[in-house]
Image (cartoon, grey):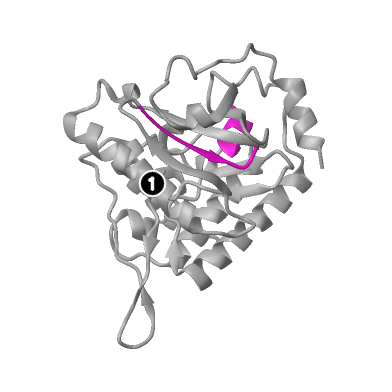
Amino acid sequence: MDYYLNRFKSTVSTVADKVQGALPGNPIFREYEVQEQIATAGPGLSWKIYSGTKNTTKQPVSIWLFEKKQLERWSKQEREDFPELLKRGVSQLTRLRHPRLLVIERALEESRDTFAFCAEPVFASLANAFAQDDNLSSHLKDFSLLDVEIRHGLFQLSEALVFLHNDAKIVHGNICPSSVIINEKGAWKLAGFDFCVAGNMTSTGKVAFPTQEWDRRVMAVMNPELNFAAPEVVQGIKCDVYADMFSLGVLAYSVFNNNKPIFDSKGLLDCYKKNIDKVSFDSIVV
């Protein structure tokens, strides 16, 4: 059970980045001892994840930190909207409980400069495991996922989706490497509920999900990850549980191909549409 924890200790060698002194305004940093940064996750990998312990009980946790100064060069509207997007995602995850979802140990707290919350101890995000964050690549340079770990992880994600779709009546809306967390025991946990869609019961007794068209007017990070998004969702045609299944399939393809998705749209909607046209016609085998 300590396999991933031992691998983590052997790969992380940097000096602890103490943030309590620099960020005293958030209550999280008065209740928990913050240690080294171990991961990043979420839209644009904007959450910095630190290992830590609770001061009173010494319980190990992961501490998730978002610094608002990251948005200094953004437009005024995006500086207002993006933090609300992150808050919404954490709030939704906090209300959900399932073994395949990331466990929130301490609800989100906001200060003038930061958001922070605590979750179960983690090893890395799936995005980090494939070195999408250059600042962490040295920590994980000797880490690689075995095929059996990938298969088991994908099965765990499918269990998370069964719960979301059948019980919670929620479409996750952004199944991608930055939304998948590997905990310290090696389990894959689903997080990143920033773009989730709650279903509404219709008069016929069926669940319907509101459509959310991909918005080219804002930065790509404020939309679901294009490389993993279902075409009908991106185009605002419909939203249902099959969109998550599509994204899980693309994720499966990606993780078995060294993090290379079926196509790379580079966050550009026009590029995505051209790629989808190629998949729809050129790749069909009769």
* Range of magenta residues: 114-131
Furthest-front residue in this view: 56
In depth, the one of 264 and 245 nearer the eye is 245
In depth, the one of 61 and 162 nearer the eye is 61
Q: Can you give x and y, in whole percent of width and height, for residue 76 in the image?
A: 17, 30
Residue labelled with disc 1: 224
Q: Can you give x and y, in whole percent of width and height, for residue 9 in the image?
A: 75, 24
Q: Residue at x 50, y 50 (%)?
A: 175
In depth, the one of 142 and 62 nearer the eye is 62
- In the rendered structure, which amino acid carries the disc numbered 1? Pro
Tag 1 secondary structure: loop
247 w.r.t. 112: above or below: below
Location of the N terminus by quadrant is top right
- Magenta-span inclusion, residue 116: yes
158 w.r.t. 89: above or below: below
Please say whether residue 268 is visible from this viewpoint: no
Furthest-left residue in this view: 76
141 w.r.t. 253: above or below: above
Q: Residue at x 26, y 21 (%)?
A: 72
- Count neighbours of disc 1 (C-alpha within 10 A) and say few if under 14, some if 14 to 19, many if 20 or more: many
Residue 131: quadrant of the picture:
top right
In depth, the one of 69 and 199 nearer the eye is 69
Q: Can you give x and y, in whole percent of width and height, for residue 264 in the image?
A: 45, 38
Q: Can you give x and y, in whole percent of width and height, for residue 198 in the image?
A: 37, 64
